[in-house]
Amino acid sequence: MKLLTTTARGSAAVLTGALLMGSLAACGGGSQQAATVDKSTLTIGVESDSASFGYDPIRVADAQRQFMEGLYDTLLDLQPDGTAGPGLATKFEYNADSTVLTLTLKDGVTFTDGSTLDAALVKANFDRRTDTALSTYSAIAKGGAQEIASVDVVSPTQVAITFAKPQPGFEKNLTSTMGMIVGKTGVADTASLATTPDGSGPYTLDPSTVKGNKYVMVKNEKNEDAADYSYSKIVFNVIQDPQARANALVSGQADVAQLTSPTVDFAKSKGVGVSRIGGTVQTMISFDKTGKTAPAFASEKVRQAIQHAINRQALVDALHKGDIPTWNALPKDSAGFTADLEKTFAYDPEKAKSLLAEAGYANGFDFTIIASAQTQTDLQAVQKDLAAVGITMNVKMAASTDEAFAAVATTPLGYAPLGWDNPIGLMYGAILNGFTNVQKATDDQLSAATGEAAAAKDDAARKTALTKLNTRLVESGWMIPLFESLSNWGYNTKKVQEVQFAGTNAYPLLSSYKPTN
């Protein structure tokens, strides 16, 4: 049985507070110095619209966690070391065979609609798992390897989640969007979440928000953990162009911003601080494995031909210096990483042509991929590689964010960063059952390897399972990895302390941003 009772955000706040006091004491005149700290507004420059689907947290995944955690509390909090700690649930317990997870809930939590947290509300949130539009919850729907068989109210402050199969370690899922709880009004009328969030988080959405452009959050004084967040107001500015985002940081229009590798040196040369972490694989994702949008993609050999056709090293040398070309779906530091894939799917245009011929496409084929300002240059480089083996990839710029998101159903191939901090959650929530597989393709080996990894009892078993998973993702062509990028977060050193990451997660905790003293 696992039992956890410490407060994650509280621990982080104590540590940060201790460091701050030590720094002020060293400077002398602590109270006078603290008075000059600017805690009014933090502006974050982000690469995409985190609320394209509205404010329903379980319609999105981990990449939107940082944004959504301003508006919603999670059942369990992601701690600075990357583990799960108490959140809306003050403790969690598994039964002996890890088929039942019991959560004990906080008292006195109020949502923006005026409703309060209780076990019935948590059950109502999880009972939404039958809605196939909710990508996060597809991981726990009926038939999935993480299937939740039932959610039961034990008492007003206790809820029991029963799994169809043992799920040790499931608690990590509850630290991200899957664990975010929506108030009573939002649960009853989920359509309302398209325009109005209904959370209990440390911030509320300000009317000055301009959807798709600028999201303004102001401190929610009803949230008892709001004091752990340094800034009275947080603004998320959507700046899709990488250079424009770096310029905004340098000019002071943004205090923190996501940077791409090509803009890091520029930002550093202007005095900007940069924090970096690996673990994000820039990946071409086969949305269509059934041939619905492009018949050729129904063939595994065609998808393997694309693997061989791409010169990853040349791509990195030309456009992503400092990043790492990769033939692995999982990051280099992952337990499932294997150097064998570098040889198996090495750059080999002749092999690509041979596979195309075997699949019946000796004369090639054409398809369309949707690009953004951020992905256009990379896709144009890949476009040339594919053309060399007879594949015509038409690169179409997205006319809107909606068109970009709709591409999962209208085009056979996409391009996006994938963070593997929680590989089991990503597989169940996005790849096997989620938004990257709207055609409902199946692969027995992928499903088996994912289930094996989820059930692994020790590091050796987990490594074996994740290696199988990684190998099959590439072999099947469900994933066509290009390079592993370092996640780069630039920050104004005069206003913000060094950006910190929670374990290996590529997206910093919102509570981790602290003003320079």
Image (tube, rainbow, N blue to C red):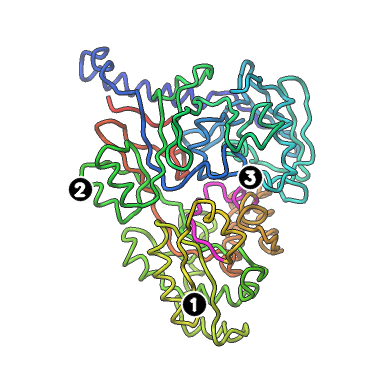
Q: Tell me which residue sits at (74%, 31%) in the image.
A: 123
Q: Distance from label 2 to label 1 (Cα)? A: 39 Å
Residue 421 covered by magenta stretch: yes
**In front: mark 2 or mark 1?**
1
Q: Tell me which residue sits at (41%, 73%) in the image.
A: 311
Q: Residues within 10 Å of mark 3 (few under 14, many from 20)?
A: many
Question: Viewer-proximal residue, 467 or 366?
Answer: 366
* Left or right position of 213 against 480: left
* Left or right position of 100 against 238: right
Q: Distance from label 3 to label 1 (Cα)? A: 34 Å
The x, y position of residue 349, in whole percent, is 46, 81
Question: Viewer-proximal residue, 478 or 403?
Answer: 403
* Kind of residue at badge 2: Ser
Element marked by disc 1: strand
The x, y position of residue 413, in whole percent, is 55, 65
The residue at which mark 3 appears reads as 136
- Total marks in image: 3
* Kind of residue at badge 1: Thr
Label for residue 269?
A: 2
Instruction: State which quarter of the image contains the C terminus.
Output: top left
Highlighted magenta segment, given as a residue range:
413-428
Q: Tell me which residue sits at (62%, 56%) in the image.
A: 431
**Which numbered disc, 2 or 3, marks the residue that appears first in the sequence?**
3
With respect to residue 321, does 381 lie above or below? below
**Which numbered disc, 3 or 1, marks the residue that appears first in the sequence?**
3
**In front: mark 3 or mark 1?**
1
* Kind of residue at badge 3: Thr
**Which numbered disc, 2 or 1, marks the residue that appears first in the sequence?**
2
Q: Residues within 10 Å of mark 1 (few under 14, many from 20)?
A: some
With respect to residue 460, does 478 lie above or below? below
**Cβ atoms at labels 2 and 1 below 8 Å apart:** no
The residue at which mark 1 appears reads as 392
